[in-house]
Amino acid sequence: MSTKIYTKTGDGGSTGLIGGTKVPKSDLRIDAYGTVDELNSWIGLINDQLNSPEFKNELKDIQDRLFTIGSALACDAEKEPKMKLPDLHETDIKLLEVKIDEMTAQLPEMKSFILPGGHVTVSSIHICRTVCRRAERLTVGMKELNLFVDEKILRYLNRLSDYLFTLARYAAEKLKVEEIPWKPRV
């Protein structure tokens, strides 16, 4: 017999962190790891849209790292969790930098700001980028409130948003979609 997905323990508006601490569902920590979860779903969508052997494993690895980040953000740092949680490594950040550099080397120089659009895949990647920036802002907010946030999480999310911006440009190039330059009114 399978277990039920619903527990009814959150019906009153609270939830438990890893470690057992109860917090309101409106808690900044819940918002942060919920946004990371949202980002993970968007990454799954762009992986399906790209349907590219070049990125299939890379994006799955990013999704795995986002689960790692979500676990860390969902953990009460003052209580030792009963289970071993995965962690982020410097090599995870370095890999994003390497991938950004590899894609950038194949792109034309950017001469203006660009607007998201031109193809549903490119637009979806830009949505991922903006959700990633929101996750980053929320984790910075946690740090400002003296909630524990591993510095590698902040750096990973920052680098991931750069990766996603570059991936959007790279996807446009591969899809032969012209970038849309921003032409401000003057």
Image (cartoon, rainbow, N blue to C red):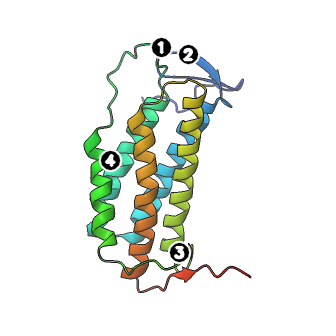
Earlier-in-chain disc, 1 versus 2:
2
Give the x, y percent position of residue 170: 38, 74
Q: Is residue 153 above or below residue 128?
A: above
For badge 1, the amino acid type reads Glu
Q: Cα distance, mark 2 to mark 4?
A: 30 Å
Earlier-in-chain disc, 2 versus 3:
2
Q: Residue at x 63, y 32 (%)?
A: 28
Q: Residue at x 46, y 36 (%)?
A: 70
Q: Cα distance, mark 1 to mark 4?
A: 26 Å
Q: Is residue 68 above or below residue 174?
A: above
Q: Badges 1 and 2: C-beta atoms under 8 Å apart?
A: yes
The residue pinned by badge 3 equals 120
Q: Residue at x 55, y 74 (%)?
A: 113
- To which quarter of the image does residue 153 belong? top left
Earlier-in-chain disc, 3 versus 1:
1
The residue pinned by badge 2 equals 21
